[in-house]
Amino acid sequence: MFDARRERELAKERGYDLIRPIDEAYACGEITQFEWHRRVQAVIEPAYLSATTEQQGSGHSGTEQEWHASRSLIMHAVDRPGTFLDVGCANGLLMASVERWSRHRSLAVEPYGVEISPALADRARARYPQWHDRIWTANADGWYPPMRFDFVRTGLEYVPRQRREGFVRHLFDHVVAPDGRLIIGKTNENRGESEVADGLRSWGWTEMREVRRAQAHPDVEMSVVWVSQSRQPPPPACDAAD
């Protein structure tokens, strides 16, 4: 039973075996949030920098066609011209992909990126020198950008599970434009289970959109969830726990 569960979790996240102990150490209070980020970065950064394909350098193990089938799910949420910020932009491939996919739909979408790893941010700037000044090096959780964005794409896995509500609220309060959208995904989830959407509802968001697509593993689905800034719930009675 455990082997089947582990196989499913690996299908959802290739680094499951390496990240799980870090999550457990944070949950037990053994490490700080700063240390959590440091350890996760120590796992991800070398893998991305040593990648042999551009999609591997952006966290996708499949082919170029599989990248398109997976990440283009985001385009359900990008339905008008505007600015697009990729949180955790890695080598910048998603920025470039969204700009190209939007152009094919006659939408003028200007891409931006923020990346916690200085080495990965430098890689993105080198690959896309025309966007050099649009790629920042920062931890998006606590980052105050010089502008706000019409579309902000992120993953909840970029912060510890206990910090996710606070992370989402920070993005809405300081990063998403007043009439903008927060896009979460693409996320690999258990088939038939909308963990991201359910989490947002538990934090007070009641109106959102979600699209799902089958993944190679029969028990896993890909999902993208988005919420408009105008649908943000009132602040909680007290600040979300760090």
Image: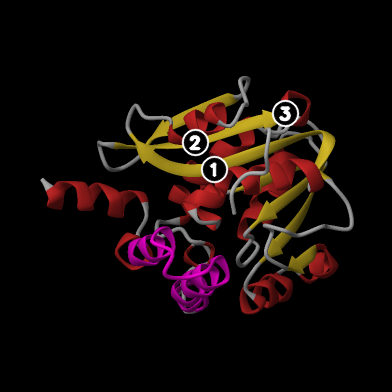
As helix, strand or loop, the secondary structure at mark 2 comes to: helix
Which label was assigned to residue 196? 2
| Residue 70 spot, x, y in % from top left | 48, 44
Q: Residue furthest top?
A: 207
Any part of residue 150 in sight? no
Badge 1 crowding class, 10 Å Cα cut-off, few under 14, some 14 to 19, many 20 or more, is many
Q: Residue at x 79, y 71 (%)?
A: 129
Query: Reading the chain from its start, which is encountered first: label 3 or label 2?
Result: 2
| Residue placed under numbered mark 3 in the picture | 232
| Residue placed under numbered mark 1 in the picture | 185
Q: Residue furthest left?
A: 1
As helix, strand or loop, the secondary structure at mark 1 comes to: strand
Q: Is residue 108 left or right of residue 53?
A: right
Asked whether disc 1 touches disc 2, contact meaning CB atoms under 8 Å apart, the reply is yes
Asked whether disc 1 touches disc 3, contact meaning CB atoms under 8 Å apart, the reply is no
Q: Residue at x 71, y 76 (%)?
A: 126
Q: Which residues are magenta?
A: 20-49
| Residue 174 spot, x, y in % from top left | 80, 47
Which label was assigned to residue 140? none
Q: Residue at x 38, y 61 (%)?
A: 28
Total number of numbered discs in the rendering: 3
Q: Is residue 64 left or right of residue 219?
A: right
| Residue 238 spot, x, y in % from top left | 67, 39
Q: Is residue 47 above or below residue 229?
A: below
Query: Reading the chain from its start, which is encountered first: label 1 or label 3?
Result: 1
- Residue type, numbered disc 1: Gly
